Image: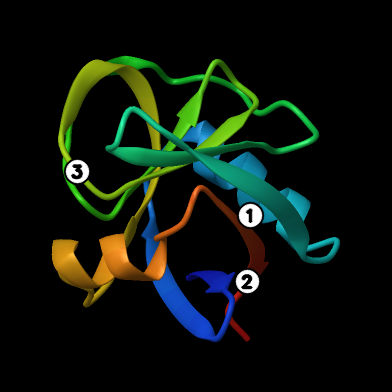
Amino acid sequence: MLVIQVGEHTLTATFADNSSATALKQRLAQGPVSIDMRDYGAMEKVGDLGFSLPRNDEQIDTEAGDVILYLGKAFVIYYDHNSWSLTRLARVNNVSAKELKQILSGAKVSVTLSLAE
């Protein structure tokens, strides 16, 4: 399970079944990763991972809660819809689109990724 800490909010996400998600798990096994994220297109938060992961791009119709890899190095959390060729990393559990948008509100947010214990 992926843990995404956003301020006082702790989100969990279920990893996708692909080599990108596996590589992210392997990196997080070495310790947490912090990412500064900014709003993009009024549909997502995006930030640089600081390292690259393998890509498994496919045409995806995103929805709120999709955790995506873009261009092999950008970490994206969607809070609205989009359609593009992307790599799915995970899916946030048990949070509505409205709640997620509120959690990710503001022009910039910092998140910390880790593995559930």
Give residue 87's position: percent from left, percent from top: 40, 27
* Labels 3, 2: front one: 3
- CA gap, disc 3 to disc 2? 25 Å
Residue linked to disc 3: 80
Residue that protrudes farthest toward the right in the picture: 30
* Labels 3, 1: front one: 3
Which mark is drawn over residue 115?
Answer: 2
Residue linked to disc 1: 25
Give the residue displayed 55% in from the left and 86% down from the top: 8
Element at badge 2? strand
Element at badge 3? loop
Give residue 56's position: percent from left, percent from top: 43, 20
Q: Amino acid at mark 2?
A: Leu
Left or right? Give the position of 45 relative to 29: left
Give the residue displayed 69% in from the left and 48% down from the top: 36
Q: Quadrant of residue 94?
A: bottom left
- CA gap, disc 1 to disc 2? 7 Å
